[in-house]
Image: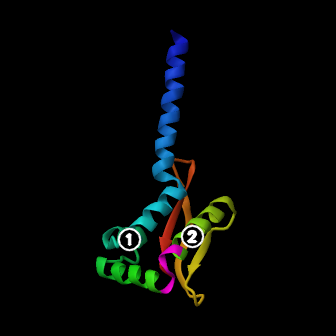
Amino acid sequence: IPWVIITFIIILIGIVFILLKNFNSPEAQTKILVNAIDNNDAQKVATLISTKDVPVDDEEASVYIQYIKDEVGMMKFIHDVKHTTDKLNKSNHDSAYIQTKTDKNVLKISKNGTRFLIFNNMSYRPP
């Protein structure tokens, strides 16, 4: 009977880890941002790029979304954000930028502590 309990606890810990990873890993955070921009969800984008010092409202987020789509292109943006987040997550660097076709910075991705002591917390800010 003790082996059954230990096995059950190990399975539960595995399930909890998988759930945490699916919602809190840098890849999951990136997917949330990309989906919000791709679906023109200005409210979600405003929430993701706002800070205490620099709040972003829905109108500003809508303009920002359109700027990204026009100046970067959605396919390039998706590739660049995923690639940059992956590189940043595996390196010692604290931040990196996504750029337009004319090399203007359009999004700053930076490490912002950790989530649940396991996953890097990424922050996304307009430059």
Which residue sits furthest bottom?
Answer: 102
In this orientation, does residue 121 appear? yes
Which residue is depicted at the point 52% across and 63% down?
122
Mark before the other along the chain sequence, 1 or 2: 1
Element class at badge 2: helix
Residue 73 belongs to the span the image colors magenta: yes
In this orientation, does residue 51 appear? no
Which residue is depicted at the point 35% across and 67% down?
44
x, y percent for residue 51: 41, 72
Would you name the residue on which mark 2 appears?
Answer: 79
Please determine whether, in this image, residue 21 is positioned above or below residue 78. above
Which residue is depicted at the point 55% across and 85% down?
100
Number of marks drawn? 2
Would you name the residue on which mark 1 appears?
Answer: 45
Magenta extent: 71-75
Q: Quadrant of residue 85?
A: bottom right
Disc 2: CA contacts within 10 A as few (<14), some (14-19) or many (>=20): few
Residue type at mark 2 is His
Residue type at mark 1 is Val
Please determine whether, in this image, residue 34 is positioned above or below residue 65. above
The label on residue 100 is none
Which residue sits furthest right?
Answer: 92
- Relative horizontal placement of residue 83, taking residue 11 as reference (left or right): right
Main SS of residues in magenta: helix
Q: Nearer the viewer, residue 82 or 116?
A: 82
